[in-house]
Amino acid sequence: MKPLRTLLCEKHGLPETEFSRYLFWRCLYPHATALVPLFGGFNGSYFAADRDLITNVGEITTRKALQDEIIDYFMDPGNRLWCRRVARVRVSTTALKRVVGEFLTNGDSTHPVVGSRPPLRRA
């Protein structure tokens, strides 16, 4: 199975070197967009935890693996800052889950699962 990085880049016609930047801007909280330059930009140290999360998520092949990456992300010491916890100047893990759901399966199905509800059982 192909990793998320490859699937997303193929669908959007992006070189794989643009994956992290693309996913960062797609998953960033909308109100945080204008604040990125004030915090050093995409490559600034403030967004190191976000870049690490996105890099790691790029290698996953199932949605189940995403949950482990998100847990690690929230355990990062950089996420203890008020700006990140309360003001949410960071990527949205909900948005990230939505993107991953477009491309990857749960690991026990051949169909991607999108949304928060489980699929309906067919009789």
Image (tube, rainbow, N blue to C red):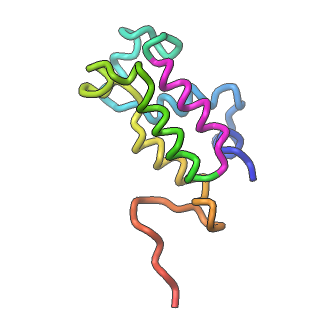
**Is 6 one of the magenta-colored residues?**
no
Residue 55 in magenta? yes
- Asked whether, in this view, residue 122 is left or right of residue 35, the answer is right
Q: Is residue 27 above or below residue 48?
A: below
Q: Is residue 86 left or right of residue 115?
A: left
Q: Residue at x 46, y 49 (%)?
A: 98
Seen at 63% across and 60% down, the residue is: 107
| Quarter location, residue 28 | top left
* Residue 118: quarter of image: bottom left
Q: Is residue 52 left or right of residue 2?
A: left
- Residue at 48 percent of width and 23 percent of height: 49
Residue 78 on image: x %, y %: 41, 19
Counting from the top left corner in percent of width and height, residue 12 is at 64, 41
Report x, y in % for residue 58: 63, 37
Whether 119 is drawn above or below 34: the answer is below
Q: Position of residue 85 (x, y in %)?
A: 29, 27
Q: Which residues are magenta?
A: 47-61
